Amino acid sequence: GAVVSQHPSRVICKSGTSVKIECRSLDFQATTMFWYRQFPKKSLMLMATSNEGSKATYEQGVEKDKFLINHASLTLSTLTVTSAHPEDSSFYICSARGDGAKNIQYFGAGTRLSVL
Amino acid sequence: AQKITQTQPGMFVQEKEAVTLDCTYDTSDPSYGLFWYKQPSSGEMIFLIYQGSYDQQNATEGRYSLNFQKARKSANLVISASQLGDSAMYFCAMREVSGNGGATNKLIFGTGTLLAVQP
C-alpha cells in the first residue's frame, strides 16, 4: 500500500511554456500533499503544502504565481510551472501524507524538468 | 529551531557487512517523529523506517534498524547484511514543530549520506 504516482517522470520544454506535473495517491486518500524541489546532490527543499479543497501554503521565497498548485480531490494534486525558464530546470518531487498516526509521507518518483 | 545533521557525505561498505549512517537532531519539543528515506539514482524517495520520540524500543524493519539514543539526540540507521542494491542516498528527517508547539506536517531533511556498497 501507500503508493504515490507522479507523472511525467521527465519533461523537456521550451522557455516560456507552462508545464503541469501530477501527483496521485493510488491506494489511499491524502488530504495533504507536498511539493519539493531538489537541486543536484542537495537535499529536498519544500516548496508548498497542498491541502485538498483549499489554497496551498507556500514556503518563504517560493512564487505562488510561478508555481500553481491545485488539490482538487483527495487523490490528486497538480503543480504547474508557468512560463518556465531555464532556471526552473530541476527535479520536482511530491509526497502524500498517510492517514496513520505516524504521518508518514510517501513520495512519488519525481519529475525531471529541463527548460531549454 | 529544529535541525537535522548528517555528518557523513559518503560511505563505503563491503557487501554483506553492516553499516551505520549517522543522524543527529535538535529540537526542544518533547514530541517528535524521526524518519529515514532512501533515494536511489532513479530519484524516488523510499520510506524506510520511523521512530517516535516516545517509543520505548528502537524501530526495526527487516534489515533496517534505528539506533535511537534520545539523550544524545541521535537516530542512526543501521543496515545489516548490505546488498549492492542498498547503494543510494539516505536522508534522515524529522517532523517539524511549529512555533506554538504543535506538530506540523512538514519534514525537515538532513543533507544526506551517499552509501556505496562494494562487491
Image: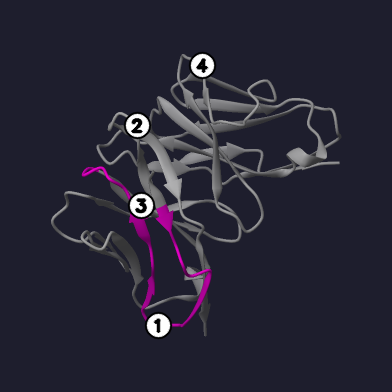
Say which label, 3 or 1, has the lower sequence index. 1
Looking at the image, which is closer to me, B51 or A8? B51
Q: Distance between the residues labelled 3 and 1?
A: 24 Å
Label 2 marks which chain's residue?
B
Q: Is B96 situated above or below B116?
A: above
Badge 1 is on which residue? B16
Q: Label 4 crowding class (10 Å Cα cut-off): few <14, some 14-19, many 20+?
A: few
Whether residue A106 sits left or right of residue A99 in the image: it is right
Label 1 marks which chain's residue?
B
Q: Which of marks 2 and 4 is in front?
A: 2
Could you tell me residue B45's position as x and y percent?
50, 51
Badge 3 is on which residue? B35
Could you tell me residue A62's position as x and y percent?
62, 30
Q: Label 3 crowding class (10 Å Cα cut-off): few <14, some 14-19, many 20+?
A: many
Q: Distance between the residues labelled 2 and 4?
A: 21 Å
Dots 2 and 4 on the same chain:
no
Dots 4 and 3 on the same chain:
no
Which structural element holds mark 1? loop
Which structural element holds mark 3? strand
Badge 4 is on which residue? A55
Could you tell me residue B23's position as x and y percent?
38, 62
Identify residue type, mark 4.
Lys
Could you tell me residue B17's position as x and y percent?
38, 83
Q: Which of marks 1 and 4 is in front?
A: 4
Magenta region: B4-31
